[in-house]
Amino acid sequence: MKRVLCILVTVTCLLVAPVVAQEKYITLYSQPIPESDLITIQDDSTGNFLLISLSSGEYKFYRCRDGLTFAGIGTVKLNGCAVTFESIDKLHRVLASVDECDQQAKAAIEIFTRWGNKFDIEPIKEYLSDSNMRDSTTECTTKAQSTKP
């Protein structure tokens, strides 16, 4: 009887161990919770802006000089105050790095040309640098213009 019980306990341990090992790691410290689900990165010099939803990964880029908009879904990673975002495929690349504690961000938006298509688009390369996300808006004004009395 002891032998059967020992075999059953051993088999149970062997079956349960892989399931427990696959469970997600639970963070024991609390990370700062962003004030909002929506991050706005507005370039200091051009007014161009990128909106990113932290929960869904949806994003929208707006270029002020001609009204070009570009939208999609990417991947958001949170690590304390640091937020990284990326959406990459063969036609475009959108990368962003945000420091929620210092309220600063940088982003790069690139749309590549598709050769051989009669509807070729002009390649786009836009870089955003937001030194103070607290004053970011979704209006096409540069930070210098929006702070003047």
Image: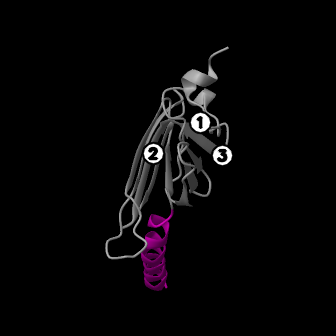
Spot occupied by residue 17 in the image (x, y as percentages of width and height): 44, 70
- Quadrant housing residue 49: top right
Q: Residue furthest top?
A: 149
Separation of marks 1 and 2 at Cα, in angstroms: 19 Å
Q: Which residue lies under the disc numbered 1?
A: 32
Label 1 vs label 2, nearer the camera = 2
The one of 48 and 88 positioned closer to us in this rendering: 48
In this rendering, is residue 149 above or below 61?
above
The one of 31 and 96 positioned closer to us in this rendering: 96
Q: Residues within 10 Å of mark 1 (few under 14, many from 20)?
A: few
Q: Residues within 10 Å of mark 2 (few under 14, many from 20)?
A: many
Q: Which region is colored magenta?
A: 1-23
Q: Which mark is residue 96?
A: 2
Q: Which mark is residue 55?
A: none
Spot occupied by residue 69 in the image (x, y as percentages of width and height): 56, 54
- Quadrant housing residue 64: top right
Q: Residue furthest left?
A: 115
Identity of the residue drawn at 46% across and 85% down? 4
Q: Which residue lies under the disc numbered 3?
A: 37
Identity of the residue drawn at 48% across and 71% down? 19
Amino acid type for the residue under numbered disc 3: Asp
Q: Secondary structure at mark 3?
A: loop
Q: Is residue 137 left or right of residue 16?
A: right
Separation of marks 2 and 3 at Cα, in angstroms: 15 Å
Quick one: label 1 or label 2, which is nearer the N terminus? 1
